Amino acid sequence: MQVSGLSNVRAIAAGEDHSLALKNDGTVWAWGRNDLGQLGNGEQTPSFTPVRVSGLTGAVSISAGGNHNLAIVETRRISV
């Protein structure tokens, strides 16, 4: 069953009572319990539909734990 509102997803992760999706554009979306800020949207209200994790772009990998999440963000070396 597809999660409503999500497409172009390359990875998912599940915590204790919340889930994450990493989209192909490097944004991360979360839904579920949020009493400890698990959804990363600056609120503590649960959401049963995905909300975008605030301020996170360029993610290449995600992981979720009990009440926390991790993301690896792409970095680019620029030669001057």
Image (cartoon, rainbow, N blue to C red):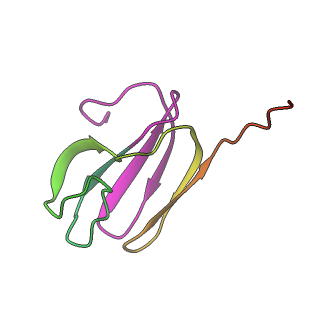
User: x, y (%) of residue 50?
Assistant: 26, 42
Vertically, is 19 above or below 27?
below
Vertically, is 17 above or below 47?
below
The span shown in magenta is 1-28
Q: How many numbered tags mark residues here?
A: 0
User: x, y (%) of residue 13?
Assistant: 47, 54
Left or right for 45, reference 52:
left
User: x, y (%) of residue 15?
Assistant: 40, 65
Which residue is more in the foreground, 71 or 15? 71
- Give the residue at the far front of this rendering: 80
Q: Is residue 72 magenta?
A: no
* Residue occupying image coordinates x 86% and y 31%: 79
- Quadrant of the rendered structure where residue 4 is? top left
- Give the residue at the far right of this rendering: 79
Vertically, is 56 above or below 33?
above
Q: Is residue 10 magenta?
A: yes
* Residue occupying image coordinates x 79% and y 38%: 77
* Residue occupying image coordinates x 19% and y 71%: 35
Q: Can you say which quadrant of the picture contains the N terminus?
A: top left
* Residue occupying image coordinates x 22% and y 64%: 33
Left or right for 80, reference 63:
right
- Give the residue at the far left of this rendering: 45
User: x, y (%) of residue 6?
Assistant: 33, 31
Q: Can you say which quadrant of the picture contains the C terminus?
A: top right
